[in-house]
Image (tube, rainbow, N blue to C red):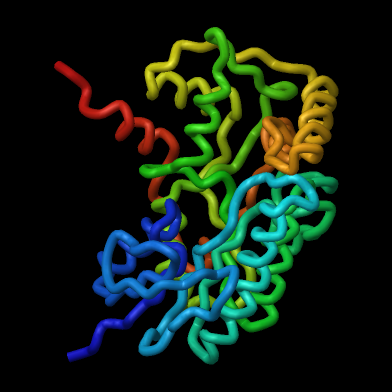
Amino acid sequence: MTTPPRIAVTGASGFCGGHVARAAESSGARVVCVGRRPGPVGEFRYWDAARSAPDLSGTDLVVHCAAAVGDPSPGSPAEALMHAVNVEGTARLLEAAGSRPVVWMSSASVYDPRPGRDLIREDHPRAGHLNAYGRSKAAGETLALDAGAVVLRPRAVYGPGDTQLLPRLLSRVRAGTLMLPGPDVWLSLTSVENLADACMAAAGWPPGAYNIADPEPYSRDAAVRDVLAAHGVAARIRHLPLRVAQAAARAAEAVARRGRGEPVLSRYAVDQLAHTVVLDVTRALERGWTPRRTLADHLADVRGPERP
């Protein structure tokens, strides 16, 4: 009888890591949740990614989901913590992993926003980042790639338990209106279930980077309308001129720098919503991964069973 593998999932108490831990358990693996808080399943081992090395003893595979997220101001303590977790923490994890295979969860935020992003392949430049998160993830994944890890690059992850993407969108509704920067664009989004499936499959993939996204990109405005409707939010979408949105972001960043906090609006947030950003997922598809979930599937779950 074959002994099931023991998979270490870092950051399993978080949104993405929790889904990965559940997917690992569903696959029959024994799960070790590594992080500051217990995960939803399996064994728990405490790890502060900003300060120490993780205990990976007895594990066969590492899926690294732990990360510091946000949009901190330059020079702030939050930016320093982000570097400590996403870069220095990665170095400590890779050393502890040794010869074990590592699947490292990155982000499409590593991609340079300046060249065209109508169809981004994995060789797209990784520079010109608009915030500390993009810079730290790019630096961390460079370490992972150099160590021979499989690096996954999702974009705008959503799904059950999401505390960032869709909740932030809903919080921007003011007086029945949601302002979006510039005209409608096409955007890749990534269902957390599709990402978790990729994490489970990726252990057998050749080392390197792989884009992970839903089967097709979405019209930004149509997707936003669907999200609002599914959550019972009555709001109209209005388009803010891009120059106005960018100017507002620069002003908000200047205010945040003085207070060393996170800006209420940033150039990064404007960029992510105002320009077409579509990921080419051919490389992952060629490895046999199939994205099975869409935004429509998630929103149908949010709405619940239809009443007769």
- The vertical placement of 177 against 266, above or below, is above
Nearer to the camera, 28 or 58 = 58
In the image, farthest residue toward the left: 308
Residue 151, how many percent across, how many down? 59, 69
Q: Is residue 41 visible?
A: yes
Closest to the observer: 22 or 216? 22
Residue 290 as seen in the image, left or right of residue 266? left
| Residue for point 21% across, 27% down | 305
Q: Farthest top residue?
A: 175
Residue 265 percent location from the top left of the image? 70, 31
Q: Residue, x 74% and y 43% (percent of image)?
A: 260
Q: Is residue 301 above or below residue 150?
A: above
Residue at the image position 28 percent from the left and 76 percent from the top: 30
**Residue 10 % position (x, y):** 45, 68
Q: Is residue 93 above or below residue 131?
A: below
Q: Which quarter of the image is occupied by the N terminus?
A: bottom left
User: Quadrant where the C terminus lies?
Assistant: top left
Q: Name which quarter of the figure residue 207 lies in.
A: bottom right
In terms of image quadrants, where is residue 81?
bottom right
In the image: residue 79, left or right of residue 114: left
Side of 41 relative to 256 (left or right)? left
Tell me what residue is drawn at x 42 percent, y 19 percent. 229
Closer to the camera, 224 or 44? 44
